[in-house]
Image: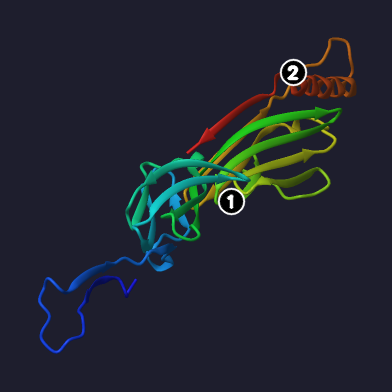
Amino acid sequence: AVDAGLYKCVPKQREPASDDVAKVFNLEVYVPPRIIPSKSSKDQFVQEGDNTTLICFASGFPHPNIAWHKVSGKEEKLLYEIYGQHQGQFVFSEITRDESGVYKCTAYNGEGMNDTRTMLVDVQYAPTISTNVQVKGLDVQLECMVEWNPQGENIWTKDGEVIVQNWKYEPKIINDTSSQTTMILFINQIEGPTDFGQYSCIARNKYGNAIGNITMPVSTESSPGKGKNSAKENGVCKSLTLVLMTIFLSVYEF
């Protein structure tokens, strides 16, 4: 490209050549596109709702065209294309988590090979929680499905007290994806009213907290004519029936 420009051809002779003898040539040097990393965007980590811009700067002659694609596995979706410019921008306004992913800019001008650059856009946000309960005989499995990015801390509590793992309580974490976590609490061998109350799963990261509450009601009613021990056993049975039929689920987020 440095050799491009105007060149003047003058016949070699003793007397100065007149303009009608000289010939001027314009030399154009065609150069394949090349994306300049130092002038282009790197991976972006941005909070949901913010604005951000991806920049792709390319040299070459003729001036390159720049195309933006979103990459999903082997598929590429064309998003935007700009023609005859060294710099192409892709702007996100109030970005959402659905716009997370890998983006690729391609510079081309019909000369030589195209040049490409990929950039990760990682949209981050506070956790949200949904809850579920599974009952298997006398055992109960509490589940909290957490959606968050990045992942952070998580704990289980019962009536405000942090649950410590033992034979009765078995907490488990399953990271389904980088932004989806399933918190599980196994409650083994429910025995009576002491096992009931409000169970809470708590998830927090640098953007906020979320709490999922699962309340298991307690019933201590007994049937007439039964003794003390029978009344206690009957209350346990009725409590388990309530677990099976009327567990109340609620989710609180803040």
- The three-letter amino acid code for the residue at tag 1 is Gln
Q: Nearer the viewer, mark 2 or mark 1?
A: 1
- Marks 2 and 1, the one that precedes in the sequence: 1
**Residue 151 as seen in the image, left or right of residue 23:** right
Quickly name the residue at label 2. Answer: 245
Separation of marks 2 and 1 at Cα, in angstroms: 33 Å
Which class describes the residues within 10 Å of circle 1: few (<14), some (14-19), or many (20+)?
many
Tell me if I can see residue 179 in this picture: yes
Q: Please identify the quarter of the rendering in which residue 247 is found.
A: top right
Q: Nearer the viewer, residue 150 or 231?
A: 150
- Residue positioned most to the bottom: 14
Residue at image point 45% right, 61% down: 42
Q: Please identify the quarter of the rendering in which residue 5 is found.
A: bottom left
Q: Is residue 233 placed above or below 121 in the rendered structure?
A: above
- The three-letter amino acid code for the residue at tag 2 is Met
The N terminus, quarter of image:
bottom left
Residue at image point 11% right, 73% down: 19
Residue at image point 59% right, 46% down: 179
Q: Secondary structure at mark 2?
A: helix
* Residue 43 at x, y percent in the picture: 48, 58
* Residue 98 at x, y percent in the picture: 51, 39
Quickly name the residue at label 1. Answer: 151
Determine which of the numbered discs, if any, sits on residue 224 in the image.
none
- Residue positioned most to the top: 224
